[in-house]
């Protein structure tokens, strides 16, 4: 009895102390949503279903509000017409401060520090150019060869129907082909045996990725620490030096790291491991969704297959299942309906959060006559999934329409809110200074995968498959995974 009373008094004192000492909304600041749990604030509700939580807050508090989430104050800008003011904002809003805190802890390398590693951050950024522009051509050609290699090795050459799990299919093909393209080929005999172990370890790590990003200590996550160590060791410099046909991008990163004596070999390897995650972590689920939507919409599949065949025959090539397909970069660029299909599946499956950190207290301008006060250290966040599913911008937003991004045979780029044309209407790759440097490569490799799939195979969902649903557990971090795998059937087309 006495203990209960004491507990009640202590709790009351805590609540009163929290009420008086915690943050209060100041003049010109957005509405503040704290919740009753000190420090955590609204973290649990946000983590359970970020889309639902933000949508509800938007209805209650309008387009701009600040939420306490796990000790941080996050100001969400919900109106996509305001996005340009965040994306084009200069030095007062920084992206890399956040990523440089979170990525090293997740992937196991020391934070990149301008005094300890002068120029390293800039050189890493500069190397991203090797994923873009003219450099995309050799990368795309190499990916084509590697995809063909993996298809021949694992999937071509059998007649009759076979069945498979769609996510597993995408994972095994895209993981291996992307790894070979970026990092090169180990000795042939070891490639196949090592690949499945590496992929399985990657999946184990990837399953814990949301917890690591949320800064849960790795020692609390069972075998994850040992698995990460194995993955990192795969990229030790003396092993990598024996791989052939490595991309210029990874070669340059190796050279850059060599110039820093205070980076140990395991640190360099951990940077490479992080790049492996960046290059497949989102690409695999994105490939899955594009394949899933095509296979479950036969009329879309038929239209896209016809487009691919037309582009091939325009260059004088008639497809035959006995020969290897080669699609060059300029041919991939012509595949409008395929690109629209991929963009539409990005729209339906992407839930990345775009984050900037306020470098000082200042007034953030959001138009001619609007501004809000933000405090140093606060996070400014955009959550484009809300825009992607907004019925005012996208008619029937939950419906897959493979041609949503095509108009009169060209790319459709005009989407409206409040009768105003949106500058940003599709944001699976982030925005502005933090935009994904691998986005063009990602688009090309997904296109290449789908071209081979549609040219070589007849495809069907197995009977009785229910609709694939999004698993919300990595909301905020990129492309969502399906909550369960989907069974499908495929057989070689005889052409
Ligand atoms: C569908 C596939 C992909 C998606 C949806 C995706 C999405 C993203 C997103 C949302 C970000 C963070 C941007 C921000 O916070 O504003 C990012 C960053 C990054 N992505 Fe991708 N990505 C994909 C594929 C790739 C590929 C294939 C590569 C490399 C070959 C890559 C390399 C990177 C790197 C290095 C960063 C960090 C950039 C920085 O620190 O400045 N991504 N990606």
Image (spheres, rainbow, N blue to C red):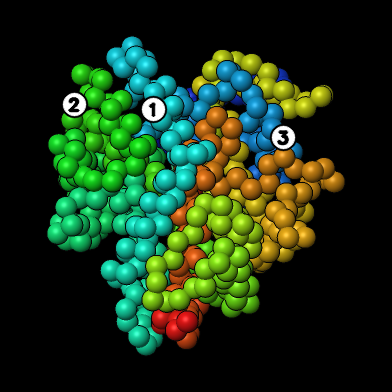
| The N terminus, quarter of image | top left
* Badge 3: residue crowd in 10 Å (few <14, some 14–19, many ≥20): some
Mark 1 or mark 2: whose residue is earlier in sequence:
1
- The location of residue 321, given as percent across then percent down, is 42, 76
Q: Is mark 2 within 8 Å of ligand 1?
A: no
Q: Which residue is mark 3?
A: 82
377 vs 61, nearest the viewer: 377
Marks 3 and 2: which is nearer the front? 2
Mark 3 or mark 2: whose residue is earlier in sequence:
3
State the separation of the CA atoms marked 3 and 2.
44 Å
* Badge 1: residue crowd in 10 Å (few <14, some 14–19, many ≥20): some
In this view, 227 is above or below 119: below
- The location of residue 281, given as percent across then percent down, is 39, 50
> Which secondary structure lies at badge 2?
loop
Q: Residue 264 — which label? A: 2
State the separation of the CA atoms marked 1 and 2.
17 Å
Q: Which residue is mark 1?
A: 124
Mark 1 or mark 3: whose residue is earlier in sequence:
3
- Residue at x-position 34% and y-position 45%: 182
Q: Residue 12 — which label? A: none
> Which secondary structure lies at badge 1?
helix
In this view, 106 is above or below 325: above
Q: Is mark 1 within 8 Å of ligand 1?
A: yes
298 vs 206, nearest the viewer: 298
Asked if one can make out residue 281 in the rendered structure from this viewpoint, the answer is no
State the separation of the CA atoms marked 1 and 3.
31 Å
Dot 3 and dot 2 residues touching (CB under 8 Å): no
* Badge 2: residue crowd in 10 Å (few <14, some 14–19, many ≥20): some
Marks 1 and 3: which is nearer the front? 1
């Amino acid at each position: 009895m006495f203990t209960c009373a004491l507990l009640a008094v202590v709790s009351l004192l805590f609540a009163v102390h929290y009420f008086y000492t915690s943050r209060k909304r100041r003049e010109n600041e957005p509405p503040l949503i704290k919740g009753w749990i000190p420090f955590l604030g609204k973290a649990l509700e946000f983590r359970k279903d970020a889309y639902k939580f933000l949508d509800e807050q938007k209805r209650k508090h309008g387009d701009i509000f600040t939420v306490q989430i796990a000790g941080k104050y996050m100001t969400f800008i919900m109106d996509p017409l305001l996005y340009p003011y965040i994306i084009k904002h200069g030095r007062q809003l920084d992206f890399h401060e956040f990523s440089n805190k979170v990525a090293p802890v997740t992937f196991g390398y020391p934070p990149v520090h301008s005094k300890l590693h002068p120029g390293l951050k800039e050189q890493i950024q500069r190397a991203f150019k090797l994923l873009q522009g003219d450099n995309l051509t050799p990368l795309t050609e190499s990916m084509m060869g590697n995809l063909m290699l993996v298809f021949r090795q694992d999937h071509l050459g059998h007649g009759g129907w076979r069945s498979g799990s769609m996510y597993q299919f995408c994972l095994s093909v895209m993981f291996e082909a992307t790894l070979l393209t970026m990092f090169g080929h180990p000795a042939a005999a070891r490639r196949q045996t090592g690949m499945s172990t590496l992929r399985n370890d990657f999946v184990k790590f990837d399953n814990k990725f949301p917890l690591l990003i949320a800064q849960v200590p790795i020692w609390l996550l069972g075998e994850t620490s040992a698995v990460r160590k194995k993955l990192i060791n795969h990229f030790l410099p003396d092993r990598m030096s024996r791989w052939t046909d490595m991309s210029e991008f990874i070669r340059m990163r190796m050279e850059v790291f060599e110039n820093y004596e205070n980076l140990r070999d395991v640190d360099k390897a951990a940077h490479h491991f992080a790049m492996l995650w960046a290059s497949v972590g989102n690409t695999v689920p994105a490939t899955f969704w594009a394949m899933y939507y095509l296979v479950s919409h036969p009329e879309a599949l038929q239209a896209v297959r016809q487009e691919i065949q037309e582009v091939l025959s325009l260059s004088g090539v008639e497809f035959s299942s006995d020969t290897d397909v080669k699609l060059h970069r300029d041919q991939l660029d012509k595949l409008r309906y395929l690109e629209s299909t991929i963009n539409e599946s990005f729209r339906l499956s992407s839930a990345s959060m775009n984050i900037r950190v306020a470098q000082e207290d200042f007034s953030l301008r959001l138009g001619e006559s609007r501004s809000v006060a933000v405090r140093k250290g606060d996070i400014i966040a955009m959550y484009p999934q809300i825009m992607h599913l907004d019925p005012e911008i996208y008619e029937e937003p939950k419906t897959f329409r493979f041609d949503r991004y095509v108009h009169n045979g060209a790319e459709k780029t005009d989407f409206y809110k409040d009768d105003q044309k949106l500058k940003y209407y599709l944001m699976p790759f982030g925005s502005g200074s933090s935009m994904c440097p691998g986005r063009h490569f990602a688009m090309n490799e997904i296109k290449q995968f789908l071209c081979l799939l549609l040219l070589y195979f007849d495809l069907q969902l197995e009977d009785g498959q229910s609709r694939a649903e999004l698993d919300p557990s990595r909301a905020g971090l990129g492309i969502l995974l399906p909550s369960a795998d989907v069974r499908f059937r495929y057989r070689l087309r005889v052409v």
